[in-house]
Image (cartoon, helix red, strand yellow):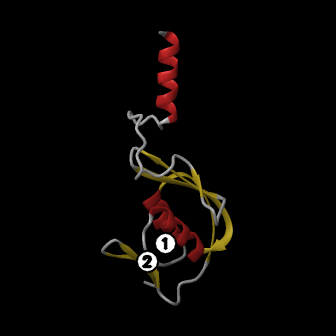
Amino acid sequence: MKRALCVLAASWLLAGATGSLAADETAAPRTAPSPSLPAITFHTVAGHVFVSLDVKNVSLRDLLLEMCRYRKINIVFDPDVEGRVTARLVDVPWATAFSVIVKSNGYVIEWIGDIPRIHVP
């Protein structure tokens, strides 16, 4: 009986402690490093995406593109959007991280439907 409980508990932990042992094909992996910017990781807890990143002097466009790629969100940049980002964020909600990165470079996010447009204020 104890062994069965241990196996069940281990299975629950491996399933992401979601309360369900069935794999959810629409859910993002618990931890997923970014393929093009390995200093970024994403994880999902109860349907909410969190970002951890430690980047130095990376392209603003590349960073935002990678963040949107993970969420499967389109993004549009005005032609004059450029800049570099140096930041360290740990377990920050995706939307907060996205907003802070854009605003720290002096730009504005205008949501048109579900597409963010990044432009000069």
* Spot occupied by residue 101 in the image (x, y as percentages of width and height): 53, 68
Q: What residue do we see at 58% from left, 70% from top?
A: 63
Q: Residue furthest top?
A: 1
Numbered marks: total: 2
Drawn side of residue 95 relative to residue 37, left or right = left
Bin the neighbour count of mark 1 within 10 Å (Cα to Cα): few under 14, some 14-19, many 20 and up: few
Q: Are marks 1 and 2 in contact (CB under 8 Å)?
A: yes
Image location of residue 5, percent across then percent down: 47, 16
**Residue at numbered disc 2:** 108
Label 2 crowd (10 A; few <14 / some 14-19 / many >=20)? some
Q: Secondary structure at mark 2?
A: strand
Q: Residue at x 46, y 48 (%)?
A: 44
Q: x, y percentage for residue 60?
A: 58, 75
Instruction: Find the residue positioned furthest to the right.
Output: 56
Residue drawn 64% across the image and 64% down it = 37
Q: Can you give x and y, in whole percent of width and height, for residue 49 in the image?
A: 45, 53
As shown in the figure, which amino acid type bears the numbered disc 1?
Lys
- Residue 103 - label: 1
Specify the amino acid type for callout 2. Answer: Val
Give the quadrant of residue 42. bottom right
Spatial distance from mark 1 to mark 2, Cα to Cα? 6 Å
Q: Is residue 8 left or right of residue 32?
A: left
